[in-house]
Amino acid sequence: MAKTSLLAHAWEVYTRNFWLIVLMAVPGLFGLAIPLLVGTPSFVALGGAYLRTNSIPDLTPLSSGLMVLSLIVSLFLMSFAIVNINLVIKSQRTLTQIGNEVAKSATTTTLSVFWIFLMASISLLIIQLLTYEYGLQSVLAPLLSLAIGLAILFVPTAMVIDDVRPYRALQRSINTVLSKSPLVLLWLLVAFVSLVAVDAVFLFVLPHPFASWLVLIVNSVLIHPYLIVLLGQIYISKYTILE
């Protein structure tokens, strides 16, 4: 399958369902914003919210509890958004009704994706803390984090499209990353270029504090949803031939 055909097909699905996808993405925006709003040791970079792990030892019990609670709520909202965007993709292939699918998946697939993301987040946190303790944070942590991120990359898509359990979804996600590695590299390139471009434009034009929030909004409701749609098309490409 030509890479240009994949990008074109993903763009067609994205633009055809633009307002519905944007609506589905709003919970993800709140999910990314919550850690910043509640004052956890986090920062905005490339339209995402990231935790300052070297600040964790200085947190009070109250701050730690607030951080954990905000992380849980944030992950659930992002899981809800990702599942619903994937439902839009599935509806294009199966002609199912979005309303019925959203109601069905609100308490099943979303919770399963949430638990996968939660386990991955805990693993990433442990990696960051251990590598920071032994002075390997700048070398080993990014490699291990990348491995975990790639492993779960297609998990939500597999759960929604194929309606499988988390363990099977993880297997299919890893298999898809390995079998579709050129397309995954294309996705990483598109993600990097688009996120850096939005970041550079807004941070250059606007004052920094306001620009960071604007970048977060634009990426959450416009860029991230397209990247999720593109992931869906990569996953579906193993079943279909896009011309």
Image (cartoon, rainbow, N blue to C red):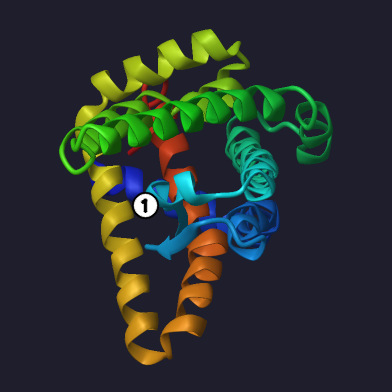
In the image, 60 versus 41, the foreground residue is: 60
Q: Tell me the quarter of the picture where residue 187 sits.
A: top left
Give the residue displayed 63% in from the left and 36% down from the top: 83
Q: How many numbered marks appear? A: 1
Determine whether, in the image, residue 233 is placed left or right of residue 210: left
Is any atom of residue 76 visible in this view? yes
The amino acid type found where label 1 is placed reads Ala
According to the picture, the residue beneath numbered tag 1 turns out to be 8
Give the residue displayed 37% in from the left and 62% down from the top: 46
Rendering coords of residue 243 (x, y %) = 33, 39
Rendering coords of residue 52 (x, y %) = 42, 52
Determine whether, in the image, residue 124 is placed left or right of residue 80: left
In the image, 44 versus 57, the foreground residue is: 57
Q: Is residue 239 above or below residue 84?
A: above
Q: Tell me the quarter of the picture where residue 205 sits.
A: bottom left
Give the residue displayed 22% in from the left and 32% down from the top: 134
Q: Is residue 96 above or below residue 11?
A: above
Is any atom of residue 1 visible in this view? no
Q: Quadrant of the N terminus?
A: top left
Q: Tell me the quarter of the picture where residue 45 sits.
A: bottom left
Rendering coords of residue 206 (x, y %) = 42, 90
Secondary structure under tag 1 reads: helix
Determine whether, in the image, residue 168 is placed left or right of residue 69: left
* Badge 1 density bin: few <14, some 14–19, many ≥20, Cα 10 Å: some
Rendering coords of residue 223 (x, y %) = 46, 60
Give the residue displayed 36% in from the left and 82% down from the top: 203
